Amino acid sequence: QVQLVQSGGGLVRTGDSLRLSCTTPGRAVGTYTIGWFRQAPGKEREFVAGINTRGRLAGFFADSLYGRFTIFRRNDLNTVYLEMFSAKPEDTAVYYCAADESGGSEPRNAVDYDYWGKGTLVTVSS
């Protein structure tokens, strides 16, 4: 069993930047493909970004969100970070990180991930 612990989130204003963190206590985060998803009220969970095991900067993104999000991993801190720039009210959602223990190349579907964090709420005010 892999535990994912998330931090960050909260209330930000339109145009602000935000960083979310995801760590895997007791397990090396670099051995998993880590994905970030979000779920807005009344909507399905959607893929945001992911980073696989190939390298620190090997990120992949939802096409519609590319350019406003970055993802990177700090192996020394055992943490994967998701950064959002130029926040918009439509970014308001619960953000989840997830781990694919098979180390998949670019999994973009929730079913491809084996373990999930509890989620953190991001609210973007207009």
Image (spheres, grey):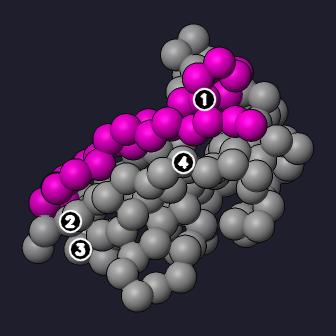
Instruction: Kindly tell me whether residue 52 is visible in this rendering.
Output: no
Q: Nearer the viewer, residue 122 or 56?
A: 122
Q: Earlier in the sequence, mark 1 or mark 3?
A: 1
Q: CA distance from mark 1 to mark 3?
A: 29 Å
Whether residue 13 is in magenta: the answer is: yes
- Determine the image quadrant of residue 107: bottom right
Image coordinates for residue 96, horizontal then vertical, percent: 50, 55
Which amino acid is tagged 3? Pro
Q: Nearer the viewer, residue 41 or 52?
A: 41
Identify the image quadrant of the N terminus.
top right
Q: Residue furthest top?
A: 76
Instruction: Kindly tell me whether residue 99 is visible in this rendering.
Output: yes
Relative vertical location of residue 30 with respect to residue 94 in this rendering, above or below? above
The residue pinned by badge 3 equals 89
Q: CA distance from mark 4 to mark 2?
A: 21 Å
Q: CA distance from mark 2 to mark 3?
A: 5 Å
Q: CA distance from mark 2 to mark 1?
A: 27 Å
Report helix, strand or loop for mark 2. strand
Numbered range of the magenta stretch = 1-29
Rate crowding at label 2 as few (under 14), some (14 to 19) or many (20 or more) other CA atoms within 10 Å. many
Determine whether label 2 and label 3 are within 8 Å by CB: yes
- Determine the image quadrant of residue 6: top left
Q: CA distance from mark 3 to mark 4?
A: 23 Å
The residue pinned by badge 2 equals 124
